[in-house]
Amino acid sequence: MSMLQRFKTIMASNVNALLDTSNPAKMVTKHLRELDKDFRQVKMELTTLQTAEQRALRLLNECKAEINKMHQYALKAMETNREDMARSFLEKKASLATKEADLEKQYESAKESTGQLKQMYEKLASDIETLESRRSTLKGKASVASAQKKINEAGVSMYQSMSSLDQMEEEVMRAQFEAEAMAELNGVPLDALEKSSKSVESAPSKPSLEDELAKLREEVKGKDQT
C-alpha cells in the first residue's frame, strides 16, 4: 500500500491518545518506530513525486510553447497568402492542444499528490517531535521515580541497620553488666566468704515462743519451791 492510500489514516492519527494507555512509555517507543518508518517512506516517495511534478510541468510548458509557435507560424502563413500552410500549422496546434490537456491533468495529479505527501511529511515530522519530547519527559519521570525508590529502600535498610545496632548495643551492655558482676564476685577473697558463711551459721538463732514459755514455767516452778 502506497503512502497516499494511507493519507486519511495518518492525517487523522492522534499521538496524544497514546499517553492514555496503561504503559505510555512502551506505546510511545513502539509508535515512534512506526512513525519513523512511515516518515522515511514518505520522504522517499515525496522526492519521486516532486521529480514527476517538475517533469510534468516542464513538458506542459514545452507543449504550450509549441502551441504558441504553431499559432505564430499559421499567422505568418496567412500573412503571405499561404492558407494551406496555415491550415497545416493549425492542425498541429489542435493536436498539441489535446496533448496539452493530458499534460495538464498529469501535472495537476502530480501536484495534488505532492501536496498530500508534503502534508503527511509535516504531520509525521510534528508527531515524531511531539513523541520524542514526551518520551524524554517520561524517561525523566522514570529516572526520578527510580531514584526515589532507591532512596526509600536505602532509608528502610538504614533503619533496619540502626535497629539491629541498637539490639546489638543492648546485648553488649547486658553482657558487660554480667561480666562486671562476676568480676566483683570473683574479686572477694575466699576466706572472707568462709567467714561470712561461718558467722551466719554461728549466729544465735532467735528463741521461739515455745522456748520462752518453757523458761517462764521454770521460773514459776522455782519460785513455788522457795
Image (cartoon, rainbow, N blue to C red):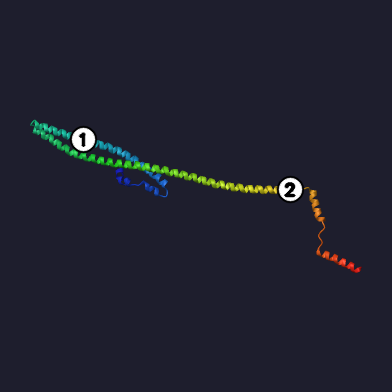
The location of residue 131, given as percent across then percent down, is: 38, 43
Residue type at mark 1?
A: Asn
Q: Which residue is drawn at 65% across and 48% down?
A: 171
| Side (left or right) of 23 relative to 78 | right
Residue sitting farthest toward the right: 226
Quadrant of the image containing the C terminus: bottom right
Left/right of residue 52 with respect to residue 151 in the rendered view:
left
Q: What element carries label 1?
A: helix
Mark 1 residue crowding within 10 angstroms, few (<14) / some (14–19) / many (20+): some
Q: Residue at x 17, y 38 (%)?
A: 97
Residue 2 showing in the rendered view:
no
Residue 69 drawn above or below residue 203: above
Query: How would you rate the neighbour count of disc 2 (Cα within 10 Å): few for under 14, some for 14-19, many for 20 or more?
Result: few
Q: Nearer the viewer, residue 48 or 178?
A: 178
Q: Indicate whether 59 appears above or below 192.
A: above
Q: Position of residue 51 (x, y in %)?
A: 27, 36
Q: Distance between the residues labelled 1 and 2?
A: 120 Å
Please name the residue that numbered disc 2 is placed on: 184
Residue at far left of view: 81
- The image shows residue 157, relative to residue 65, as above or below, that is below
At x 32%, y 39%, the residue is 43
Quick one: SS at disc 2?
helix
Q: Is residue 120 left or right of residue 155?
A: left
Which quadrant of the structure image shows residue 11?
top left
* Residue 114 location (% of width, % of height): 28, 40
Foreground mark, 1 or 2?
2
Mark 1 vs mark 2: which is more N-terminal?
1
- The label shown at residue 224 is none
Q: From the viewer's perspective, tell me whether residue 112 is left or right of residue 172.
A: left
41 or 216: which is nearer to us? 216
Q: Residue at x 47, y 44 (%)?
A: 144
> According to the image, label 1 marks what residue?
61
